[in-house]
Structure formats: structure tokens, C-alpha cells
Amino acid sequence: MTAPRDITPLLDPEIMAALAPLNLRFGKLSHATLPKVRSAMAGLAPPSLSEAVSRVDHSVVDRSPVTVRVHRAKSAQGLLPCIYWMHGGGLVLGRAVGDDPRFDDWCPRLDCVGASVEYRLAPESTYPQPLEDCYAGLRWLHAQAETLGIDRNRIGIGGSSAGAGLAAGLALLARDRGELSIAFQALIYPMIDDRQQTVSSHWQDPVWPPNANRFGWDCYLGGLTGDAVPAYAAAARAVNLEGLPPTFISVGALDVFADEDIDYAVRLRHAGVPTELHVYPGAPHGFDALTPNTTLGRRSRGDLDTWLVGQLRIR
């Protein structure tokens, strides 16, 4: 089956209009351009943040040295549930501070603690180092839960894009090592299949096209190919999905990851994992973050919030 080369005519008009002035160029990512893209992203003006939320960076030395940024409403009391988050960026871009606005919103409104991990990026750090960074941060959260005001029985994980892919791998790793419990996983358009064999993986997504996706995977896998790629690196390769925590997956219908994410949700359900899937028509990759004021952007965030509220209340 031949996939369409250009999905622009299928894009939601409101999202397409909101994307136009952003002039995204991730399709030109390469080893030569990566430093410039990182520099440009670092030069963006920081968002204004709430005085009602504290943010403390903790240096963690475990199996990996890593920094975990802990967010908590200053008015919060007692042991609270925690959302441990991994940022997006195709495994080669992004920083944990990019999720500060997310926790400025969630911590007081959802009455939770937030934690974001500064995992090392590819290509400087290849699999399994970034994933082990995420595991080390989660292990530290469990060990320090009471000190941080966290209910260790209600620590869930999540992420967006590459961060959601890391979260999916982290859930598999935690299940199999049997050291740490995870209450839930929220996977926002997760990057979970390096093989790029689905129809949607060849669509010219205006945000994260196939060549950018290939670059990110190649940087992360560091030469691993074919059957040598473990499921912890690319969760779509996992055969056994039993025993994973309740899962939320959302993705745009025009995202390059749409097929792999929908298939993962179906297989989770078949494995007996409580799973909620949302697919948004006319939406490309990253639409909720890049076009937050569109109808679909608001709807997707509302759907995630509703699901999180239900998970955070479970004791």
C-alpha cells in the first residue's frame, strides 16, 4: 500500500493556520544542523512561571548520575501522588525545564507533585544511557518519597513524543526488574517503533517528518539495528505487554506515530492492561504543545487531565 506523500490537505484548518508562522525545520535535522537547532531552542524566551509552585533541582547519583526537577505547590500538604515526566525532542533535543509550565498547571490544580528528569541526549549518549537515567530518577523518587512529600504507592510516569517512548520503555524495564512500582503511564504520541514500517511512518508530517524520525532513532540506537534492538529501546517491539500499569495514549490521526501508537494501545488491551486511547482527526505530531489554543489542542489536554484525575485519586 502506497502512503500519501503530502498530508497537508487533510490537516485540521485551525491547526494548519497556527503552525504556519512557526516555520518548523525539524525535517532538516542532521549531525551538522543539530548544534544550531539546540542553540536556537536554548535561546527561546523562557515562559513566565507561577509563584505558587516551587521547583527544586536534585542531583541524583545512582546507576546513572542525573538531575530530577521536583515541582510542588507551596500550599500543598501531606503525601501526594506524583507524576514523573520525560520531555520530548526526538531523543536529541529538549530539556526538563521545558515542562515547567505543565507542572505549574498540574501541581496546584491536580493536587500532585511533579518530577521531570534531565536524561542525557543522543547522539552523545546512546541506548541504554538515557533510559537508565530515567530509571535512576524513578528509583530515587521512590527512595526519597516521604522526604519529598510523595505517596510512593501513587507514582505514575509519562512523557510526550520521545519522552513518551522512554516512559514506555521505563514501564517495561520496571516491570521486568521488579524493584519499583508504577501506578500508571501517560503516553502522549509516543515514539516507540524504530522500524518505520507502518503506513503513517512515511507520511510527511509537517512537524516531525520521517527523515527527522530516522535521524533521532539512529542517534539513540548507536548502531543497533534489526533484532538487536531491544524492546526497552523501542517499546513497540515488546512481545509481552502483560502486567503493565493502566495506560493513556493519545496521538494525532496524521502523526507519523499514529499507526504504531494505535497498534500498541490495541495490544495493551489484548494483554489485559486498562487502556484509554484518543486519536484526534486532522492533527499532526505535537499539535497540543505547538497549537495549544486550537480546539483540538484544548480537547486533547482536557482528555489527559480527566484521565489523570481518575488515576491520581486511586489509592
Image (cartoon, rainbow, N blue to C red):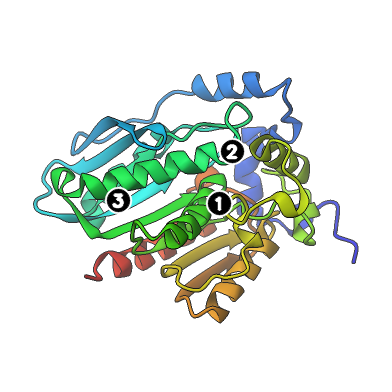
Q: Nearer the viewer, residue 198 or 256?
A: 198
- Amino acid marked by disc 1: Gly
Residue at 60% over, 74% down: 267
Residue density around tag 1, few if under 14, some if 14–19, many if 20 or more, within 10 Å: many
* Disc with the residue nearer the chain's start (2 vs 3): 2
Give how far across and how far down residue 295 sits, in percent. Answer: 51, 58
Q: Quadrant of the N terminus?
A: bottom right
Give how far across and how far down residue 269 sits, in percent. Answer: 54, 78
When asked about the image quadrant of residue 26, the answer is top right
Task: Say above or below: 97 vs 134.
Answer: above
- Amino acid marked by disc 2: Leu
- Amino acid marked by disc 3: Trp
In the picture of the structure, the residue carrying the numbered disc 1 is 165
* Mark nearer the viewer, 2 or 3: 2
Task: Say above or below: 42 vs 191.
Answer: above
Give how far across and how far down residue 185 sits, in percent. Answer: 43, 61
Residue at 70% over, 54% down: 256
For marks 1 and 2, give the CA distance: 9 Å
- Report whether residue 294 is seen: no
Q: Quadrant of the C terminus?
A: bottom left
Q: Helix, strand or loop at disc 1?
A: helix
In the picture of the structure, the residue carrying the numbered disc 3 is 106
Q: Helix, strand or loop at disc 3?
A: helix
Residue density around tag 3, few if under 14, some if 14–19, many if 20 or more, within 10 Å: many
In the picture of the structure, the residue carrying the numbered disc 2 is 91
* Mark nearer the viewer, 1 or 3: 1
For marks 1 and 3, give the CA distance: 21 Å
Contact? badges 1 and 2 (CB < 8 Å): yes
- The single residue placed furthest to the right in the displayed view is 2
Residue at 60% over, 32% down: 122
* Disc with the residue nearer the chain's start (1 vs 3): 3
